[in-house]
Image (cartoon, rainbow, N blue to C red):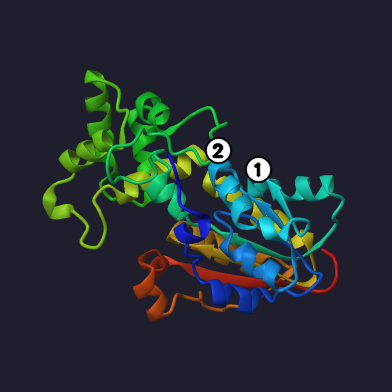
């Protein structure tokens, strides 16, 4: 597929707010744990910082490299998950950094243009792997997991109240033929959920897609790892900023920031997108930014 330039694809969520809190400075070293198409990193680089940019997605990483080519020598591109930040910094012989930014949302490339099944719009293969090197994709999971496991995935990762009827419908449908596309999965969900239970503000399949994506990519496990390792990789006074897009992530971030003795919470309440940004970029409406700062001393 021929894609437009990254800067025409990508609108970085909470860009001004995240920079205000992260406070990138000339000579500072910053980890962008979800490089995406490079919008946040571009701003850090423009302010004189050096960036170590992580992304699992090979396609997104290539677009980010294209976008940030002018900053060659000031950014290191890493095709690894942010859960491996500690290992990568050890490999680079960088003991501590000045800041860590995690934007946990999917990029426009993944949602609209990847054709890997992240979106329920249209008909795409049910892949959902952010890293195509992962062995199991969403179709594998859907067609192999037993009904109880599927219901648990939908309920705990998607907070889907109709998890059991949807799981039962998936198992019934796959008896006839494997569920292989987003269109097929959407049809199953629509049949399983009585119309009176359709959510008012989101598509009826939204939570199912969210749950499968989280499960396939082990997103919550990876987030727990980086929230545990991250504070110990910050210099005193360094900040960790996390932009989350659903309550599961936000609750994890809130609890980890609050309970980690190395951190002082900077944002008592999550920072939300302004009305102007929400109007401009509807995907920003669910974004929550939380920030914590590394205290002096060891623990």
Q: Position of residue 113 (x, y in %)?
A: 40, 46
Question: What quarter of the picture does the C terminus occupy?
Answer: bottom right
Left or right position of 106 against 88:
left
Residue pictured at 61% horizontal, 48% vertical? 55
Q: Is residue 149 above or below residue 61?
A: above
Residue placed under numbered mark 1 in the picture: 79
Left or right position of 285 against 266:
left
Residue 168 at least partly seen: no
- Looking at this view, is 204 or 110 the one in front? 110
Q: Is residue 46 above or below residue 251?
A: below
Left or right position of 207 against 86:
left
> In the rendering, which numbered label is found on residue 70?
none
Quadrant in the picture for residue 23: bottom right
Q: Position of residue 85 (x, y in %)?
A: 72, 50
- Looking at this view, is 286 or 228 the one in front? 286
Residue pictured at 58% horizontal, 73% vertical? 18
Residue 214 at least partly seen: yes
Question: What quarter of the picture does the N terminus occupy?
Answer: top left
Q: Position of residue 217 (x, y in %)?
A: 51, 41
Left or right position of 135 against 291:
left
């Amino acid at each position: 597929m021929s894609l437009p330039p990254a800067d025409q694809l990508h609108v970085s969520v909470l860009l001004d707010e995240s920079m205000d809190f992260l406070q990138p400075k000339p000579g500072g070293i910053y980890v962008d744990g979800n490089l995406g198409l490079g919008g946040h990193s571009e701003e850090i680089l423009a302010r004189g910082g050096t960036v170590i940019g992580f992304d699992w997605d090979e396609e997104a990483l290539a677009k980010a490299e294209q976008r940030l080519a002018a900053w060659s020598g000031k950014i290191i591109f890493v095709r690894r998950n942010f859960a491996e930040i500690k290992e990568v910094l050890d490999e680079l012989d960088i003991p501590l950094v000045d800041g860590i930014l995690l934007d946990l949302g999917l990029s426009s490339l993944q949602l609209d243009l990847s054709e890997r099944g992240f979106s329920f719009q249209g008909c795409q293969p049910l892949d959902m792997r952010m890293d195509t090197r992962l062995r199991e994709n969403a179709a594998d999971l859907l067609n192999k997991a037993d009904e109880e496991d599927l219901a648990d995935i939908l309920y705990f990762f998607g907070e889907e109240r109709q998890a059991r009827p949807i799981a039962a419908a998936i198992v019934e449908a796959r008896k006839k033929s494997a569920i292989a596309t987003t269109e097929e999965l959407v049809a199953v969900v629509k049949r399983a959920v009585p119309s009176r239970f359709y959510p008012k503000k989101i598509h009826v399949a939204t939570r199912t897609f969210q749950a499968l994506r989280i499960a396939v990519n082990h997103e919550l496990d990876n987030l727990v790892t980086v929230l545990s390792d991250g504070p110990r990789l910050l210099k005193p006074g360094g900040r960790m900023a996390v932009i989350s897009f659903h309550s599961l992530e936000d609750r994890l971030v809130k609890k980890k920031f609050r309970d980690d003795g190395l951190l002082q919470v900077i944002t008592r309440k999550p920072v939300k997108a302004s009305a102007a940004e929400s109007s401009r970029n509807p995907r920003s409406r669910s974004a929550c930014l939380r920030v914590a700062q590394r205290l002096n001393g060891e623990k």
